[in-house]
Image (tube, rainbow, N blue to C red):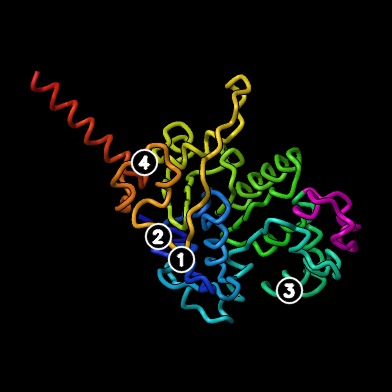
Amino acid sequence: MSTPLLQVKNLCTSFNVDSGEVRAVNGISFNLDKGKVLGIVGESGSGKSVTAYSIMRILVEPGKITGGQILFNGEDIVQYSNKQMREFRGKRVSIIFQDPMTSLNPVYTIGNQLREAILLHTDRNREQANARALEMLQLVGVNEPEKRLKQYPYELSGGMRQRVMIAMALACEPDILIADEPTTALDVTIQAQILELMQELQKKMGMAIIMITHDLGVIADMCDEIIVMYAGRICERGTADEIFYNPRHEYTKGLLRSIPRLDTNHARLIPIAGSPVDLTNMPKGCAFASRCDECMKICLTELPEELDINDFHKASCWMNVKQVYDEAAREKEAENK
């Protein structure tokens, strides 16, 4: 069996602040194979973006990776020097941020910023870099690309700026593209265009994608695997079909209930009650227990282990253990009759 392109093993990332240690990512593990699309979903503060920034090693102080490994082709990039990471970023793994207006430098033209990325991570000269920049703008569907190279970010629409960010991220043909809420600042029509564009480019270039979002609906038909995060931990993982049609964690069920549906005759959306847990004062048991309608006594005192639902689906919820025992009890009762 081939080694996964990316292996995250027991990753822990913390922020030491005045109120204590914020364990933003608390021992998560997952694999990403070449050419596959992995979705990471969860509410704000669940640890999605911190996971991405940890992989890219672009955490802002006081953020720090405190444990675990991030293996790229078998090499632990946590141990890379700053020079090695500068070569790694852009060339091997690129990232698209939430807001293209704040990600692009307002005082440099689009052409300058695209050329800088290409010159930094490839052996192309300035003329070749300019040709590559033009080629990438054409690839991502930017109209009048020659004109856009001379323009500044404020002269472009939100959707156009996001296309420029995608062009910049893909200019050096990375093995992995991390998209951190790439459609958050865009209207619904442009969202669909950007997601469709990313799917087309992923198939054309054969790269792997990590798609980070708070909206399960955004990645319904895009991901090979979906990871659901809550309070810095993975609470459920599986294929898109398993997550959408057979959710086995109460938090995942809550996220799905909050998605508008076309087949429910305008049914009222059901929000998840309560507030996210305080990461500086994590409970002993399940972090979602205080918000869970199915909470049991054990949920408050013991952290549930990840249980295999099937070969492609895992969840960390005591309800699954209860269900196993209930089924066993029913079977035993049936045998005794």
The kind of residue on which mark 2 rests is Thr
Give the labeled residue for mark 2. 3
Q: Secondary structure at mark 3?
A: helix
Magenta span has 313? no
Residue 57 screen position, x and y as percent:
56, 71
The kind of residue on which mark 1 rests is Asn
Q: Secondary structure at mark 1?
A: loop
The kind of residue on which mark 3 rests is Leu
Left or right: 16, with 195 as reference point: left
Q: Quick check: 252 above or below 35?
A: above
| Mark 2 vs mark 4, CA separation in Å | 39 Å
Classify mark 1: residues with Cα within 10 Å, few (<14), some (14-19) or many (20+). few
Classify mark 3: residues with Cα within 10 Å, few (<14), some (14-19) or many (20+). some
Q: Residue at x 13, y 27 (%)?
A: 332
Q: Earlier in the sequence, mark 2 or mark 4?
A: 2
Magenta region: which residues?
141-163
Q: Are the two marked residues, 4 and 1, in contact with CB atoms closer than 8 angstroms?
A: no
Q: Residue at x 44, y 62 (%)?
A: 281
The kind of residue on which mark 4 rests is Cys
Left or right: 180, with 138 as reference point: left
Q: Quadrant of the C terminus?
A: top left
Q: Quadrant of the N terminus?
A: bottom left
Left or right: 166, with 258 as reference point: right
Give the labeled residue for mark 3. 119
Dominant SS of magenta comes to helix
Give the labeled residue for mark 4. 295
Q: Quick check: 287 above or below 324?
A: below
Q: Earlier in the sequence, mark 4 or mark 3?
A: 3
Q: Are the two marked residues, 2 and 4, in contact with CB atoms closer than 8 angstroms?
A: no
Q: Are the two marked residues, 2 and 1, in contact with CB atoms closer than 8 angstroms?
A: yes
Q: Earlier in the sequence, mark 3 or mark 2?
A: 2
In the image, which disc is placed on residue 73?
A: 1
